[in-house]
């Protein structure tokens, strides 16, 4: 297959849904020669912040002179974004070559009845990343968990450090109704004797994660305990932070915007210090510089100044609160919100956080089978009807928002990373 054919193949299986269990991934990886065993890995789970932590860790490793693979999801514009070495995306040629081989292996395994069902979209991409990193001989790989942890395709590896960023209500149909149940699923990435870095602040969730770590005799490192080890300093245009570990004192100002990115940086710093113990030396200055210079698109990403245009993939309560906190502090009125979301998300809850902070809300949609229709969103947010307009076409929604914001206002795009990706495509054009 060439790259275009690869995309068509992935589109055909994209709606295959979610399937729990590691049997398919393990069978496919075995047929590929167990590529995931050819380099050490860091595995990062969590409800929010895991992509940013992965980006910061990869930047630290890059500055330290290591060839580091990075696997994340979903992508914003191109599948190539999901699989990187350092800051370089996998090429179309390498992507298509690896996927062609994987497709052939899947067909063989099905014909031999070694696979009872075809792997899902995410399982295939995860195996592709493992295979590509082995082919390119990376020194280490940083992997973002897709959903949950225990049965996620990425959990087919044994990491040298496990990281859990935050716990909030998400994917409750699959992960459980309570934060304790969700924490149990995330804690499924913990392996016997492997250090765990925990950035979670919810006490019931911390207890569940700590319990699992103790059962497996995995050293447990709670990032924000004691609480005064982490300090936030607010300035006219953003934040700076201080974080004290057992090894060093760090002062830093991340390029990534928002108070929550300082917390993500503290998680990344703690994970880097664990790598110091179990893998290679990472200098304190490189760790600090890494969290300061990491870039992660679509997370409080400012792409224009007049009017200010901010893209944020906030899709759950915790993410919406972080975005809302930033808007209260730093957004210049009028604030125009472009909003679209998956239909299985808590639409009303997110609206109650973000809509009151906006002078006008434009409901739109993105091309994905799970996307909510604008009319459906409006029905669930009737109390804000006086400020809501519907514009299904994202290009037109952007033009409308820019006109409403005028030169000094703020356009905010939020509700889904899929929406952010579509807006980035429009903006490039």
Image (cartoon, helix red, strand yellow):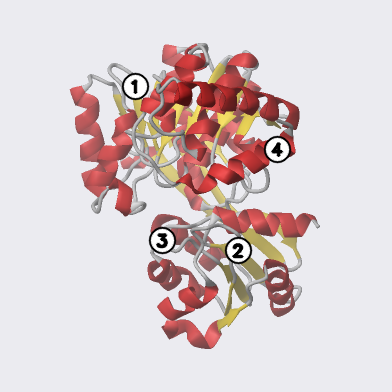
Q: Nearer the viewer, residue 357 or 8?
A: 8
Looking at the rendered structure, which numbered label has been put on residue 195?
1
Total labels: the figure holds 4
Q: Is residue 312 left or right of residue 278?
A: right
Instruction: Report the Cα–Cα distance between label 1 and label 2.
Output: 37 Å
Dot 4 or dot 2, earlier in sequence: 4
Relative image position of residue 120 (x, y in whole percent): 47, 38
Would you name the residue on which mark 3 appears?
345
Relative image position of residue 53 (x, y in whole percent): 50, 37
Q: Nearer the viewer, residue 333 or 17?
A: 17
Q: Residue at x 56, y 38 (%)?
A: 252
Dot 4 or dot 1, earlier in sequence: 4
Q: Nearer the viewer, mark 1 or mark 2?
A: 2
Q: Residue at x 40, y 23 (%)?
A: 113
Let me know if residue 327 appears in the view: yes
Would you name the residue on which mark 4 appears?
5
- Image quadrant where residue 197 sits: top left
Q: Nearer the viewer, mark 4 or mark 2?
A: 4
Instruction: Report the Cα–Cα distance between label 4 and label 1.
Output: 41 Å
């Amino acid at each position: 297959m060439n790259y275009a054919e690869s995309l068509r193949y992935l589109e055909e299986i994209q709606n295959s849904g979610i399937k729990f269990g590691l049997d398919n991934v393990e069978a496919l990886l075995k047929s590929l020669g167990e590529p995931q065993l050819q380099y050490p890995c860091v595995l990062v789970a969590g409800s929010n912040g895991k992509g940013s932590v992965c980006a910061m860790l990869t930047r630290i490793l890059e500055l330290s002179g290591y060839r580091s693979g990075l696997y994340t999801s979903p992508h914003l514009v191109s599948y190539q974004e999901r699989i990187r070495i350092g800051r370089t995306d996998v090429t179309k040629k390498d992507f298509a070559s690896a996927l062609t081989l994987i497709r052939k292996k899947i067909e063989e395994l099905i014909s031999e009845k070694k696979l009872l069902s075809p792997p899902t979209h995410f399982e295939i991409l995860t195996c592709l990343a493992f295979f590509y990193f082995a082919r390119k001989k990376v020194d280490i790989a940083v992997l973002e968990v897709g959903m949950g942890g225990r049965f996620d395709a990425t959990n087919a590896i044994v990491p040298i450090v496990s990281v859990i960023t935050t716990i909030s209500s998400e994917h409750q149909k699959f992960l459980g109704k309570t934060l304790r149940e969700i924490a149990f699923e995330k804690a499924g990435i913990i392996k016997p004797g492997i250090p765990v870095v925990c950035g979670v602040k919810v006490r019931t969730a911390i207890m569940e994660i700590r319990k699992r770590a103790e059962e497996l005799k995995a050293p447990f490192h709670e990032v924000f305990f004691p609480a005064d080890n982490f300090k936030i300093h607010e300035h006219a245009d953003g934040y700076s932070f201080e974080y004290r570990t057992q090894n060093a004192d760090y002062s830093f100002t991340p390029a990534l915007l928002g108070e929550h990115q300082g917390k993500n940086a503290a998680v990344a710093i703690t994970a880097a210090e664990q790598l110091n113990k179990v893998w290679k030396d990472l200098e304190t200055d490189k760790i600090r510089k890494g969290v300061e210079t990491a870039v992660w698109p679509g997370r409080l990403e400012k792409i224009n100044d007049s009017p200010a245009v901010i893209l944020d993939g906030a899709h759950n309560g915790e993410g919406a609160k972080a975005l809302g906190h930033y808007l209260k502090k730093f957004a210049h009125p009028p604030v125009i919100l472009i909003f679209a979301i998956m239909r299985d998300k808590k639409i009303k809850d997110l609206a109650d956080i973000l809509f009151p902070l906006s002078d006008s809300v434009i409901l739109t949609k993105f091309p994905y089978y799970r996307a909510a229709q604008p009319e459906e969103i409006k029905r669930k947010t009737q109390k804000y009807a006086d400020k809501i307009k519907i514009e299904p076409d994202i290009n037109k929604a952007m033009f409308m928002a820019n006109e409403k914001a005028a030169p000094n206002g703020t356009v905010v795009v939020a509700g889904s990373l899929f929406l952010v990706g579509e807006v980035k495509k429009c903006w490039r054009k």
